[in-house]
Image (cartoon, helix red, strand yellow):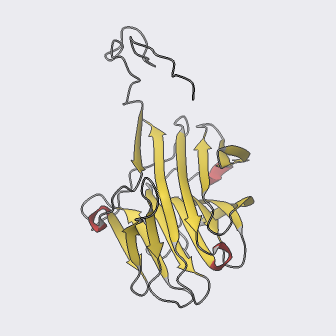
Amino acid sequence: MSSPQRYADGVTNIAKGKTLSEMPMPDPTVTHGYFNDFFQYSTADWITSTSGTGTLAVSDTVVGGALVLTPGAATEGKFDSIQLSKDGGTNDSEVFLFATGKKAWFKTRIYGADVSDMELDIGLCIVNTDLRNAAPSDGVWFTSDDGTTDIDLIIAKNSSQVKVSGVGTWADTTWISLGYYWDGVDAIHYFVDDVKKGEVYVGTSLPDDEYLAVTISNETGEATANALSVDYIGAWMER
């Protein structure tokens, strides 16, 4: 590995004469965001919805940590669904709002035990306790259905959905990263393993009238409690 370039005086993205212009680092107030690398997990940080007695715990075998969502019974249709909480597990932290003129980013890295027999939903969604059986009215999230290895992207506003099918595929016991970028103008660009796969021009479908929360859901597609592991998840928006 080569040595890093060293900037002893710092690096900045701040215009000269601004409040933080002499600070030797980029302005942290340009965006607001949330990132979790799952070194630890607390039920108080999330609103948890399950059918059965599912478990959510940090893996002991993934370097750097990962949250493992294991449905509670070896029965088809059992699920674990969580949304970020703002107050110790009582109410959702719906703090993200898409807007024209404000860029936004989302990224996660996941791993499925048996992906063709799992039902995945992960991204930013309005408050919801059962994503698979009662789809969120608003949000932008990645999804995968039972019986396929395809991953799709859903953009929903007021229960009207735009679905981008087959943005990527995932495989059993293989890590994959998923992400998207709202350019603040007219398009959401989507990425798989940090490679851009395309963009969708949202028109009037951008969910810009509801606040959204970080959301993760895993449901069984067969009579096996197939686990979903989440290495990290993050979302950021311009102020």
Q: Is residue 141 visible?
A: yes
Q: Nearer the viewer, residue 134 or 106?
A: 106
Q: Residue at x 53, y 66 (%)?
A: 137
Q: Residue 82: x, y in percent?
A: 42, 68
Residue 133 appears in the figure: no
Camera-side residue: 68 or 80? 68
Which residue, as the protein is rendered here, is positioned at the far front?
1
Q: Is residue 65 left or right of residue 192?
A: left
Quadrant assignment for the N terminus: top right
Q: In which quadrant of the rendered image does the C terminus lie? A: top left
Q: Between residue 58 and residue 144, name the one nearer to us.
A: 58
Q: How many marks?
A: 0
Residue 69 position in % (x across, y down)? 46, 72
Drawn side of residue 153 relative to residue 133, left or right: right
Asked if residue 194 lies left or right of residue 10, the reply is right
Residue 146: which quarter of the image?
bottom right
Residue nearest the viewer, comparing 19 with 147: 147
Above or below residue 65? Residue 159 is: below
Q: Is residue 174 left or right of residue 92?
A: right
Which percent across, then down, holds residue 68?
A: 45, 68
Percent position (x, y) of residue 179?
A: 59, 49
Q: Quadrant of residue 55?
A: bottom left
Residue extending farthest to the left is 88
* For residue 227, above or below residue 33: below
